[in-house]
Image (tube, grey):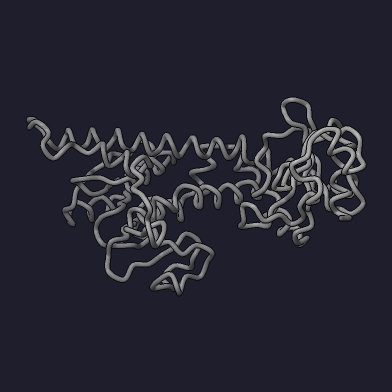
Amino acid sequence: MGTHSGSFQCDEALGIWMLRTLPKWKNAKLVRSRDPAVLDGITAEGGIVIDVGGVYDEARLRFDHHQRGFFETYDGKVGEASGPEGATGKFLTKLSACGLIYKHYAREILSELQPSLASNEARLNAVLVKVYESMVEGLDAIDNGIEIADTVRYIEGTGLSSRVGRLNPRWNAEPVDDPVARENECFERASALAGGEFAERVDDLVHGWLPARDLVGAALAARHGVDGSGSVICFESGGMPWREHLYQLEREAGLGPVTKFVLYADQGGMWRVQAVTVEGTAFTNRVSLPEAWRGLRDAVLCKEAGIEGCCFVHAAGFIGGHKTREGALAMAKAALLS
């Protein structure tokens, strides 16, 4: 395997780590060089070169993104776009070295890290996209100098790219007999750091995010058993991330924004009735709890709502509580009719 010598960044550090998860390159020697002859020699012997050399050619196992005219995206057709406006897929961010490796090898990489994904195409596809949009795309953008916003309000220096960058030898570090060996050692530390966080992200998605998706899907399918309107879904316990899954699963099923309220029991045993927000907003609800209930508690709320056992309704009308599941459902039904 080959990548460039000199100061390293997160994209090639992670790219090399990802390649090492694959049997073909697990034990491959890493050469860090900018010499074209050395790089050509690596690929001539069946090796792979990333982030250096000015060539992007999958057939030759060359994966650089610095050359003039390069513009590829994660899900775009290769060679068809020259900028974001011409991108053929959902994603518009120009790839860096790790994005290129992810584009071409992610299915194999994720299957090596989480073998259960290899036998379930739908789950693998869901994780493929989520890993890219929640981690790799940001690394691509940072390496290519793409700001997260047109106006940046503060400097963020705790991210993975920043932490990898700080592992480079300092400009005024004490001289050593073999500076190349020191630089390579620092690179290996950086690659391990980036890869460890990548593996943790994948593990969290497989063992936390996907199970939540399954439960939300089951609740959505069972919604008419909760209420005939099909506008209320129920979870047996709270704490689960459900919003993102609900929006996505509604779209996949062609349902539109049908779900208005979610019921679940909190850690204290109170049943919550929570409004579903309009996708893309933080505070705009599809349907809110009635204005007359907002800010009320206990007996005062019970009298106003005409429902015994009510505990509270938030002043913003996005969430309320009841002593029982049946009572929380009654609050949701009343809200739907208000």
x, y (%) of residue 4?
23, 49
x, y (%) of residue 278?
68, 57
Q: Residue at point 10% right, 37% down?
A: 172
For the residue pair 186 and 272, the one nearer the viewer reads as 272
Residue closest to the far top? 268
State whether residue 316 appears in this view: yes
Vertically, is 170 above or below 56? above
Q: Is 120 on the left or on the right of 294, as rendered?
A: left
**Image quarter in which the C terminus is found:** bottom right
Q: Residue at point 38% right, 42% down?
A: 159
Residue 111: image quadrant is: top right
Q: Is 39 on the left or on the right of 146, as rendered?
A: left
State whether residue 235 appears in this view: no
Q: Residue at point 78% right, 52% down?
A: 260
Residue closest to the far front? 300
Residue 219: image quadrant is: top right
